[in-house]
Image (tube, helix red, strand yellow):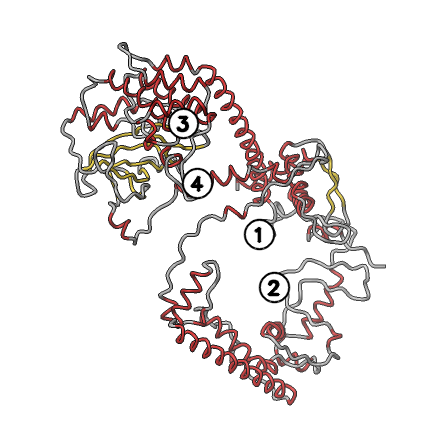
Amino acid sequence: MNPKQCRNVLIHGFCKYENSGCEFSHGREMSGFANSAALHHPGSVAPQAVFQTSASPDWKKGKLRFDSPEFKPSNIISAPSFAPSALSSHVGFNAFESSFGAENVDQAYPGYTSSRASVASVNNYEDNLIGGFGAMGVSNAFRATPQLQQQHHHPLHQQQQQQMQQQQKQMQQQQLQLQQQKQQQDRLSGLGSGSAFFQQLESDPFAYPDIQQGSPQQIQKTPSAPLQPLQYHLYSPALPHVTNIPPHCKPIHYFFMEDKLREQLQRQSEASQSTLDPNSPEAQSLPSEVHVYHSLFPLDDKQDRHSKVFGFPTSVYKAISSVDGRPYVLRRIEGFRLLSETAMSSIEGWRRINHASIVSVREAFTTKSFGDNSLVFVYDYHPLSTTLSAKYFVVSPLRPGVKLGVPEKSLWSYIIQISSAIKTLHSAGLAARILEPSKILVTGKNRVRLNCCGIFDMINFDGGKNTLQFQQDDLVNFGRLIVSLACGSLAAVHNLPKSLEYISRQYSIDLKNVILLLLSKRSNYKSIDEVLTMIMPRILQEANSANSYNDILESELMKETENGRVVRLLAKLGFINERPEFDMDPSWSETGDRYLLKLFRDYVFHQVDELGNPVVDVGHVLQCLNKLDAGVDERIMLMSRDEQSCLIVSYKELKQCIETSFGLLSRQ
């Protein structure tokens, strides 16, 4: 009775107790078979793998090596000859001949037909295949050698070769006719082959053009495809609400960020990384570097850049700082010559202002990089922001006619934020002086920020003598801004009685009282504190709304935080499992901790149902990984791939295996 095969060899590929008294078989009884194979084929190497025979039905397949020669069973000797019909068919026969020797094969296996007899039958197919790759610039170095191209003349093979040649000639003639018809149609329509090629790119920029349709010169002149925007519509919408869903069941969107918020953040990230084509005329007209800023990208698309607010032509660019690598906004005052050096010191007071409703001022400098004397102010960059003027006072084709006023809830939110900003500036001894709809940014949902601060203090420098008067003008301009937003028209301030009558009908009495306070003319000076006292109840509502929105954002952030923990865990598992450089290393190969982690990976990702179909369950994956990251005491059963062994292990033990294996890996 033959001893049973050692299970260490089956599981690990070797047995460390083989020479220490292990009573099971380690595959040595098949050495005679291997030696006989080597003697039968002198040009071959004795196979290292053990083959199953009918004499030992309980024999298990051993571990294969990459250098094992191909083995031909003895029962194929009586099989009829087979002529391959594709290039991939005769490659295996060539490898068989090269490993055993063609002469030895012919002598040992008379019924075996050499693959050299079938090479000629596929030459035409191979020529077409290689010719197609050659048109794309791929070399044809993989063609058969001249020795393999020699063939044994056989009537059956010659007949098959003639039939294939006739079929290929017919296909080539049909393709030639189709190409001629297409070229004739292009000539009649006024389009050459090159124009048709570019027309295909324009119709479908994601499609691969047919390379054989155009000449090599046309292919080389093919322009690179433009940068395509992100396909935001590909995000699947949230699942519909199900009233009878169990409390412990959660839809897939519960684990990820909301689609609208993700789309908004990705759009902002895309806008922050936008750059000009270096070969475009617009990019060549701009300087490559201004002070410590480079990669200028224009943000204003107005043809007439003359500013009605500042009195000088202005232009706005997004640029990247060479100091910290972050994007900033450069607002350029064109053709301005600074008359006093002390005026530059006025920017220091604005640099100390840090408020949520004010765009922060970073610095100001003069430059001649644009070809003239320009004054440049540097501000924080808020991607995809717009202005109150563009949002509420520009007539859109979707909403033609008279524009309606801002909803009262949004209007109170704007009033509270602007009042808070004015309070901060007045307390610091500064004045905004830019309370214009075109100079107030909308950077988010009901989020406004005062923009272009500090420009008037420098271009109209007076040393701070008229600051108190400018603060009074801020309050009056603030009242006019509220009237324009409420009436939906910039001309509403020119007819205040009629505008106030409209506001009293459409809005609450509190809004009208705030406007009257801001627009009133008194002998004594007004203060922003009076406005804050009047709108105090509205401030409480705004604080409640802000806190509620903050809770929503925190909940969305918490989802992504959990996803980050899962990604880190997956990265560790990917580093540990099945490393090829440690394949033959007994200290690292799939034994012990590494074997458990491999089985756990199969338990998480490679489960099948009762019919053998793969189970794709994201909920199961997230549940297992979260339990593993927490290291709970729950136990699971891991089964080997041959279903011969089962292991009971807890998530806590698996987590310890990951930490140990990753620690060993990081120290090597």
Packing grade of label 4 (10 A; few <14, some 14-19, many >=20) is few
Mark 2 vs 3, N-terminal side: 2
Q: Residue at x 27, y 35 (%)?
A: 331
Give, as a three-letter code, the residue at label 1: Pro
Label 2, label 4: how far apart the Cα atoms are: 74 Å
Q: Label 1: few (<14), some or many (≥20) within 10 Å? A: few
Q: Earlier in the sequence, mark 4 or mark 3?
A: 4
Q: Amino acid at mark 4?
A: Arg
SS at badge 4 = loop
486 relative position to 76: left or right: left
Asked if disc 4 and disc 3 are in contact, CB closer than 8 Å, the reply is no
User: Which circle's residue, 1 or 3, is located before the other in the chain?
Assistant: 3
Q: Which residue is mark 2?
A: 67
**Mark 4 and mark 3: Cα distance apart in space:** 17 Å
Residue at image mark 4: 399
Q: For the residues marked 1 and 4, what is the alpha-carbon distance in whole angstroms?
A: 63 Å
Point out residue 16 in the picture as x, y percentages from the top left corner.
Answer: 69, 48
Q: Quadrant of residue 573?
A: top right
Q: Which numbered disc flags the more N-terminal residue, 2 or 4?
A: 2
- Name the residue nearer the viewer: 525 or 362: 525
Instruction: Give coordinates of residue 59: x percent, y percent.
Output: 78, 60
To which residue does mark 1 refer?
580
C-alpha distance separating marks 1 and 3: 69 Å
Camera-side residue of 180 and 564: 180
Residue under circle 3?
486
Q: Looking at the rendering, which quadrant does residue 53 occupy?
A: bottom right
Instruction: Answer with mark 1 or mark 4, whichever residue precedes in sequence.
Output: 4
Residues under numbered marks 1 and 4 in contact, where contact means CB atoms less than 8 Å apart: no
- Residue 449 appears at what percent x and percent y? 37, 28
Which is nearer the eye, 101 or 463? 463
